[in-house]
Amino acid sequence: MMFTLAHHKAKLRHVNPRAEMHGDEHVIMGDLKFSFLSANDLLAEFDPALKSSLYRKADGDGDQLELPTGEGDRLPKLRFPKMGPIEWEVEIIGGLLTIHHGMSGYSDMRLDVRSADNFKLELMDGGSVSVTFRVQCKPTEEQFGRLCYTVQKAIEISFEPPADDGLMPGFETAAADAAA
């Protein structure tokens, strides 16, 4: 599975400019932290079995029973309501992050992603999940200025993972990194 977002409402929580050494040269990089709320169907982007492992159907235990909607896979109730947020250890190498601005797309900010990681999934009763993650990228000076004025504001973002290379597209676990 591959994590993607298309015109999704999110909040830019934090912008961290920093310098990295690339050979003898300092290169300005940026860490962007995003959070957003989504239906628990998004969990399939991480693993197809995750949603059914963590959520169940409402069973009339004091909660409103499900009305027939024709959606056989609606799972609104938490299986483990006392479980805290889940840190999903995956790193997506590459991709494109678009911060949408305006109606035409002309003013959209497009950032080449070095990596997307630090995924945190906070499960909520009712079938919602709050997702937080970090994007490492190399914004221009102008883009850094725009990003700083966007902190703590609701924005619309898209994330496109890198092209499929026939292997595990874009996903590398910490274990795979350690083995290399």
Image (cartoon, rainbow, N blue to C red):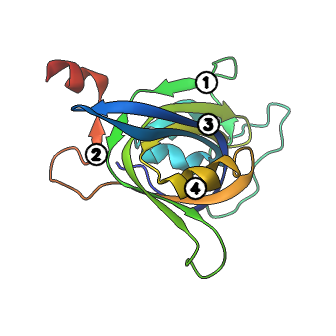
- Quarter of the rendering containing residue 29: top left
Secondary structure category for the residue under label 3: strand
Residue 68, position as x, y percentages in the image? 71, 60
Count residues near mark 2 (Cα–Cα under 10 Å), then give few for <14, some for 14-19, many for 20+.
many
Disc nearer the start of the sequence (3/2): 3
Disc 2 target residue: 170
How many residues crowd mark 4 within 10 Å: few (<14), some (14–19), many (20+)? few
Of pointers 2 and 4, the one earlier in the residue sequence: 4
| Mark 2: secondary structure | loop
Spatial distance from mark 3 to mark 2, Cα to Cα?
Answer: 30 Å
Taking the spot 42% from the left edge, 49% from the top edge, the residue there is 3
Identify the residue shown where x is 30% and y is 55%: 162
Amino acid type for the residue under numbered disc 3: Arg
Q: Which residue is mark 3?
A: 56
Q: Is residue 52 visible?
A: no
| Amino acid type at image mark 2 | Gly
Of 133 and 45, nearer the camera is 133
Disc 2 or 1, which lies upstream in sequence?
1
- Which amino acid lies under the numbered mark 4 shown in the image of this protein? Gly
The answer to whether the residue labelled 3 contacts the one labelled 4, judged by CB atoms less than 8 Å apart, is no
Question: Which tag, 1 or 3, sits closer to the chain's start?
Answer: 3
- Look at mark 1 in the image and give the residue it sits on: 85
Q: CA distance from mark 1 to mark 3?
A: 17 Å
- Residue placed furthest toward the front: 24
Q: Quadrant of the C terminus?
A: top left
Query: SS of the residue at dot 4?
Result: loop
Most foreground residue, 118 or 130? 118
